[in-house]
Amino acid sequence: MTPEEYQAHDALGLAARLAAGDVTPAELMDCAIALARERGPALNALCHADFDAARLWARDWQPRGVFRGLPFLLKDSGLASTRLASGLGSRLFADMRYAQDATLVERFEAAGLIPFARTTVPELCMAPTTEAAANGGPTRNPWDLSRSAGGSSGGAAAAVAAGIVPLAHGSDGGGSIRIPAACCGIYGLKPSRGLVPMGPSRGEGWGGLACDGVLSRSVRDTAAALDAIAGDEPGAPYAAPARPNSYRALLEQRPARLRIAVWREAWDGIEVEAEPLAALERGAGLCRQLGHEVIDAATPALDYAAFIQALIDVMAANIKASTDARLAALGRALRPDDLEPAMREGYEHGARMTATTYLGAIQRFHAIGRAFAHAMAGVDMVLTPALARLPVPLGELSMQVASFTQFRRQVARYTPFLAVINAAGLPAACLPVHWSASGLPVACQLLAPFGREDRLLQLSAQLEQAAPWAHRRPPVSGAATA
């Protein structure tokens, strides 16, 4: 199989070729590595690669799971893998090694996914753009190398959009799957809280905001991956929501006629620019054409500024805890160049925080969940803009500023419809249904009630069929697009 043939298939398409004996895992790995070498330098999307070991793993791989033996990428988020080191996009956390696989990594490999590198992230995964100093430069958007690929799963989205892999791991604590999916023109679904395991070494991330999933070019690949990784984990603090026997099988069924609310206005008077609103209208129009009832609705009332402050407090507490644990493992004190400026101030913010402040932030998150539940009563789905503007130019949202609070408040104006959904624990997905005049992907976001990934995936598949995006390839791929 040539790299060109490899890119023509989604993950399930390649798995079918494996099952038919038309290609081997080793041959697919050779294609992925060739593309990584060719496109990696322009994008700066990969780190902690071990190509030589990956070739050996693929050569000896025993086909298993739905994906049989597919090249795969793990986000540099600290997800524990005995195969690959991790650094969390930070000089302080560089070259961490693991003695045990995370439950999710075990499930990825049981599904037939062979990790061969990590994907780049901002420092400690705390930005909507992937520009960590430890990465030696920014991760670039394959559609426009002067713009951000998003974050914190920016490297994963860039690699999928550029055709290096059809499917990659991502995680989402405040939009970190959906932001890069929107920026790079691919599909990104954030699961419900508790659906995907986080153990065995931790029970939750960021006060329950964080979750793991995948980014893909096709909806069916995400559905198949979710079938493989979702479900209960012994001892988890959150119960996995009830789920169907197979999300992928549900894609063959036409969903019932849905009542879909459209939320246009962001909180605190944040402006949503014309292109994201055009994507929203495109998504709403497609839903009407598909026979669904689409209604305008008010965005739920909440104190957005207070929520952002709660998010800042919880993130700062995590910077403090993670940094102190790393320093203890290294047996030394914090040095001036260990953390980027905004992160260093976030660490100091965390050190000053009281227990009362932290608990108040968690209660604020819970209140968001209740507000969303009430606002969504009587509708099956909600449609919102994904971002408030097009992917930002590189350097505009930088952690080289001296204030973590200032940085996060800037972020809050770029992504007003995303982190609130993490607080609510609800499933949501970004879909690239619109393209700007300059050729950039622009997404809308679908939001479903808790545990209704089935409904979310079914509608996503309908929209994918009505307005396909997988045939569009960015300039960095060398392929013509339409």
Image: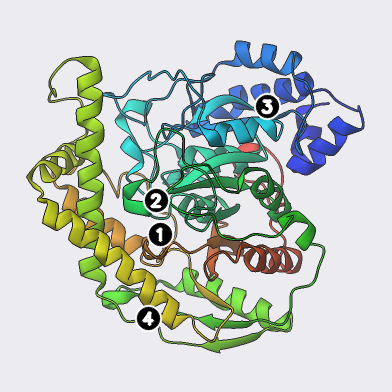
Labelled pair 3, 1 in contact (Cβ < 8 Å): no
Residue beneath the point at 24% across and 51% down: 314
Q: Which residue is mark 1?
A: 422
Pick whichever of labels 2 and 4 is earlier in the sequence. 2
Pick whichever of labels 4 and 3 is earlier in the sequence. 3
Q: Is residue 327 left or right of residue 138?
A: left
| Amino acid type indicated by mark 4 | Pro
Q: Which residue is mark 2?
A: 173
Q: CA distance from mark 4 to mark 1?
A: 15 Å
Residue beneath the point at 37% across and 81% down: 300
Q: Which residue is mark 3?
A: 32
Q: Is residue 294 above or below residue 243?
A: below
Secondary element at image label 2: loop
Secondary element at image label 1: helix
Q: Which residue is mark 4?
A: 300
Q: CA distance from mark 4 to mark 3?
A: 44 Å
Residue 236 or 36: which is nearer the viewer? Answer: 236
Labelled pair 2, 1 in contact (Cβ < 8 Å): yes
Pick whichever of labels 3 and 2 is earlier in the sequence. 3
Pick whichever of labels 4 and 1 is earlier in the sequence. 4
Q: Quick one: which residue is furthest to the front in this view?
A: 235
Mark 1, residues whose alpha carbon is within 10 Å: few (<14), some, or many (≥20)? Answer: many
Residue 149 in sight here: no
Residue beneath the point at 60% across and 15% down: 51
| Amino acid type indicated by mark 2 | Gly
| Amino acid type indicated by mark 3 | Ala
Q: Is residue 377 above or below residue 458?
A: below
Residue 144 in sight here: yes
Q: Position of residue 53 (x, y in %)?
A: 61, 12
| Amino acid type indicated by mark 1 | Asn
Q: CA distance from mark 3 to mark 2?
A: 28 Å
